[in-house]
Amino acid sequence: MDMTTVDPVRDELLSKDQGFRELVQQHQNYEKRLDELSALTYPNEDELVEESVLKKKKLLVKDEIYAMMQNYTNTH
């Protein structure tokens, strides 16, 4: 999730919703670990599996984040 662009809904949720903040932090942690794994020249099998799993988890978290943002937009 790109945290550098201005998004009033995201910013509002970050300031008011602990669950949303936790999801964003989790997404950033996955992104950081994926960057580490992609920097490996010769990843072993476990690292390749970890990378695949993290990509799926990151996508699920991203979907949750956007669903929360959409729900907030629809109710406010």
Image (cartoon, rainbow, N blue to C red):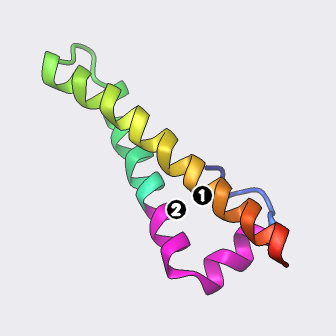
Badge 2 is on which residue? Answer: 24
Q: Main secondary structure of the magenta part?
A: helix
The secondary element bearing badge 2 is classed as: helix
Residue lying at 83% horizontally and 68% vertically, measured from the top left: 74
Q: Specify the segment rendered in magenta.
A: 8-25
- Circles 2, 1 touching at the beta carbon (< 8 Å): yes
Question: In x, y percent, where is residue 63?
Answer: 59, 47
Q: Looking at numbered disc 1 in the image, what kind of residue is underneath it?
A: Ile
Asked if residue 60 lies left or right of residue 35, the reply is right
Badge 1 is on which residue? Answer: 65
Question: In x, y percent, where is residue 58?
Answer: 45, 43
Residue lying at 81% horizontally and 63% vertically, measured from the top left: 6
Disc number for residue 7: none
The secondary element bearing badge 1 is classed as: helix
Q: Looking at numbered disc 2 in the image, what kind of residue is underneath it?
A: Val
Bin the neighbour count of mark 1 within 10 Å (Cα to Cα): few under 14, some 14-19, many 20 and up.
many
Tell me the quarter of the picture where residue 66 sits. bottom right
Above or below, 50 relative to 63: above
